[in-house]
Image: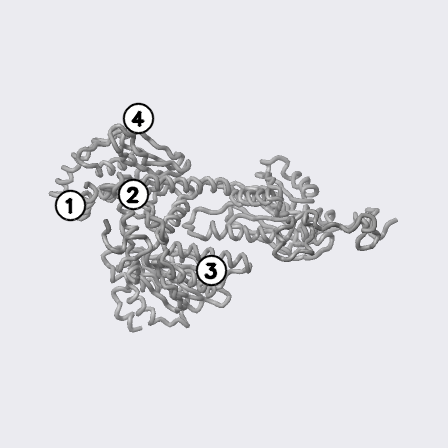
Amino acid sequence: MFRNNYDNDSVTYSPTGRLFQVEYALEAIKQGSAAVGLVSKTHVVLVALKRNAEELGSYQKKIIKVDDHMGIALAGLAPDARVLSNYLRKQAMSSKMIFNRPLLTSKAVLSIADKAQENTQSYGSRPYGVGLLISGYDETGAHLYEFQPSGSVLEYFGAAIGARSQAARTYLERNLDTITESETVEQLIVHGLNALRDTLSQDVELTFKNTSVSVVGKDTDFTIYDDENVQQWLDKLDSVSNARNREEDDEDNANDDENNTAPAETEQLEDRMETDE
Amino acid sequence: MKAVENGGTSIGIKCKDGVVLAVEKIINSKLLVPGRNKRIQTIDRHIGVVYSGLLPDGRHFVNRGRDEAQSFKSIYKTPVSVPHLMDRLGIYVQNYTCYNSVRPFGVVSIVGGVDDNGPHLYMIEPSGTCWGYSGAATGKGRQTAKSELEKLNYEELTVREAVKVAAKIIHQAHEDNKDKDYELEISWVSKEETGGLHQFVPEELLEEARKLAEDDEGEEDEEMES
Amino acid sequence: MNHDPFLWGRPSNDTYGAYNHAIAQASVQEATHDQLDQFPKKHTQQPIITGTSVIALKYKDGIIMAADTMGSYGSLMRFNNIERLFRVGKETVVGISGDISDMQQLHRILNELETDEEVYDNDGGHNLRAPHVHEYLTRILYNRRSKMDPLWNAVLVGGFNDDGSPFLKYVDLLGVAYGSSTLATGFGNHLAIPLLRQLIPNDTDYVNVTEEQAKKVVMDCMRVLFYRDARSFDKFSMVTIKDGGKGFDFEKNIKIDNQSWRFARDIKGYGSKQE
């Protein structure tokens, strides 16, 4: 099932200078369930939607702790994420061993970026099929990075990856100012869950079973809230399903303003069509 | 292969007392943190680099440059000269065109530095081709930038002046890509200004240069003639 | 026993027969170049050119460190212009005593560390500070000693903690590390520490010490060291770091003042004028 002649391996450029293998890897992220990250001045929050393969199966872990000050959320191939998070853990340990200080978030992120780049330039290896959101708090403050299999890493105020993540990004862009100015962790988490809720498809709700939340920041070690512990945060939401939100969106489009809604919404639809199959 | 070169415009200017590097950093999302995600990197204390194309490949290139510089230093106990470093990097990049098990680098890099023989500026392509330049440009707006660079008098130009010129050129080159916002990043290396170290220009100077570039927009024609 | 002046002390061939060089493959002379790796490897077993004491103390605004500039070849004063204090990053000084070639190696290692941590992809705010440099050196020195191939040095690291308080710690060729408000290496441990501790009796007392007092006691220490330590010199360098690293003062070519060698007249039993 080839799309064209230039996508057999990651060492072949297409005539337009693209690397299809790498682009397919980006596609793998979109197949994964969504993860959202956002930053205030002092804290970083990650929220993620877990999936279970079958009714009786457990939910796939979405958030992994790296160190007391750092953790990641993933979308895409979970085994690849484990490889990368193990690598990050090693880096964090050696920073403690060699310098007796916690690993700088930006250094950590760049190290996996360079590792991922190698896999895009040599025959016989495939790019990592996972996108990561890396949250960290260090002496330079609270940081959120998005990692892509291409080896690209960028720092964001808010980011979302995975299925229908465009909807979450739209939410983050609309509320950017209130998010970055958030005073409390609670506000930040509620914004995160709101954004995550926007990525839900029709018949799904946020429940304490399928939602993961993590926080790291000033005087706060990296903490993951799962299962029963996440209910306290879900209780803070006005609704846990996306249905109401959609109706509202329609109204928005009808009488609300112009600027970012229109183009973003179409993109969002495209996104859905691709991943809902 | 050349199609890779569609990233933000990068330029380098070699002056009588040093080198200035500048890049137009396209902002794809307003969620990106301003002032972070730096594009200009340092190979050794006295050598800087900026590139356009596949940015992760650029990082690979820079890491190799750092390894070369450090291994040179560990053998000869003296900082590597820019021409020698470029020679080594040229070989490395060229090697990636020789085998079907790897792909060539997807970046064009502009490397500038100051050593005992004064300032140097080089541009290196995916093929491994590596030339010295007085003014170099790559990326989407390279045509505009090149024609502006040709008007400069490199014998007289100082780095302090060149910072402003660079800001202006990047601004003009951005005209080709106007639908997206950009952030300006400028670095310099000069014996007089930075003691031979490669550094980002101070915030005030960057701001001044950016203001000038934007104000000049109106008086473009006048500027062209002078 | 062989009484030939050049082979004195060796077993005599007449009595014991010629030495069998094949034992433990100990003869390098008979080997060709590519066989050399089969022979036992010899590591550093003693320093060659050496630098003597480094002394340092904390005071209320920061730290002061001093070391003379001599490199001795045994008892020969081989070099008199060797700088043994090094600046690392923005606000840290490292003072090294012991083998000079190993000191130069450490200097290169520290330089590379500085390039890695301070220059590459540094967006600011994440600086290499004294505790990190000290931890790193401890790892290096301990690793080398565990390979039975030590870097023959004793090192002082001075600077500031993350919270801005003064930092001063020691680490040596064995990987032994400790911290104190008053520190010295080598002979300084015997000769300078008592003087330093007179000024700073308890570890926390440095907060009452002014820069003037601190500099005076450094000068006194260097003078006593010059009087009593035969491998010392009367020219030294001194680094003063204060206010969390904002002030970094590197003074070179300081001459020890107020020398009085009167006491030497009363010393008997050394040198040419023995009675």
Instruction: Tell me, for residue B46, which label it has, or none.
Output: 3
**Above or below, comparing residue B49 to residue B35 in the picture:** below
Residue B172 horizontal/vertical position (percent) = 28, 64
> Which chain is mark 4 on?
A
According to the picture, the residue beneath numbered tag 1 turns out to be A257
Report whether mark 1 lies on the same chain as mark 3.
no
According to the picture, the residue beneath numbered tag 4 turns out to be A228
CA–CA distance in space, label 4 to label 3:
56 Å
Disc number lying in front (1 or 2): 2
Residue C192 horizontal/vertical position (percent) = 68, 43
According to the picture, the residue beneath numbered tag 2 turns out to be A158
> Which chain is mark 1 on?
A
Q: Which residue type carries mark 3?
A: His
Q: Earlier in the sequence, mark 1 or mark 2?
A: 2
The residue at 53%/53% (across/down) is C111
CA–CA distance in space, label 4 to label 2:
26 Å
Res B226 quadrant in image? bottom left
Res B204 quadrant in image? bottom left
- Nearer to me, C61 or C13: C13
Q: Secondary structure at mark 4?
A: helix
CA–CA distance in space, label 2 to label 3:
36 Å
Give the residue at the far right of this rendering.
C275
Disc number lying in front (1 or 3): 3
Q: Number of labelled discs?
A: 4
CA–CA distance in space, label 1 to label 3:
52 Å
